[in-house]
Amino acid sequence: MAHHVEDTTNLSPAERDFNNFILKGDSFSKIEIYRLAVEEYNKAAALHINKLLVEEKLAYCKKQMQFEKKVFMVLGAIALVIVGAVYLFR
């Protein structure tokens, strides 16, 4: 999923910016800070350089964020049940 360019000397400023946004996004994604990864990937998308790559990375992050949301909802429901049970049985 990584997008690395070995020789950046022949890149335009926009291409260098694109690569930097992708690398920052990849770094955030790797440590599971998907909201910040999405922000970086959106900056890359605005440069219209490699639409497919950005769409893949955004789709991955959004999928992970949806999973996290479901996990937090389930954990929240479990916490409510536990708190309710503790309250009822004291």
Image (cartoon, grey):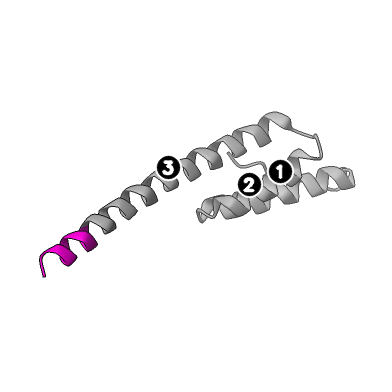
Query: Where does label 2 land, which residue?
Result: 38
Q: Which type of secondary structure does the marked residue at label 2 adopt? A: helix
The answer for how far apart the CA atoms under marks 3 and 2 are is 15 Å
Q: On the image, which quarter does residue 1 sit in?
A: top right
* Viewer-nearest residue: 84 or 82: 84
- Left or right of 74? Residue 52 is right
Please state, as top left, top right, bottom left or bottom right, where the C terminus lies in the image: bottom left
Q: Is residue 5 visible?
A: no
Query: Where does label 3 land, which residue?
Result: 67
- Left or right of 4? Residue 28 is left
> Which residues, given as a range, are shown in magenta?
82-90
Identify which residue is drawn at 79% across, 40% down.
Answer: 46
Report the magenta stretch's main SS.
helix
> Magenta segment: does it hold 87?
yes
Q: In this picture, is 83 found above or below 3?
A: below
Query: Where does label 1 land, which residue?
Result: 42
Q: Of marks 3 and 1, which one's residue comes earlier in the chain?
A: 1
* Viewer-nearest residue: 88 or 77: 88
Identify which residue is drawn at 72% across, 31% down.
Answer: 51
Residue 68 lies, in percent from the top left, at: 43, 47
The answer for how far apart the CA atoms under marks 1 and 2 are is 6 Å
Give amino acid for label 3: Phe
Question: How crowded is the residue under tag 2: few (<14 C-alpha within 10 Å), some, or many (20+)?
Answer: many
Give amino acid for label 1: Asn
Q: Which type of secondary structure does the marked residue at label 1 adopt? A: helix
Q: On the image, which quarter does residue 55 sit in?
A: top right
Give amino acid for label 2: Val
Q: Of marks 3 and 2, which one's residue comes earlier in the chain?
A: 2
Q: Are marks 1 and 2 in contact (CB under 8 Å)?
A: yes
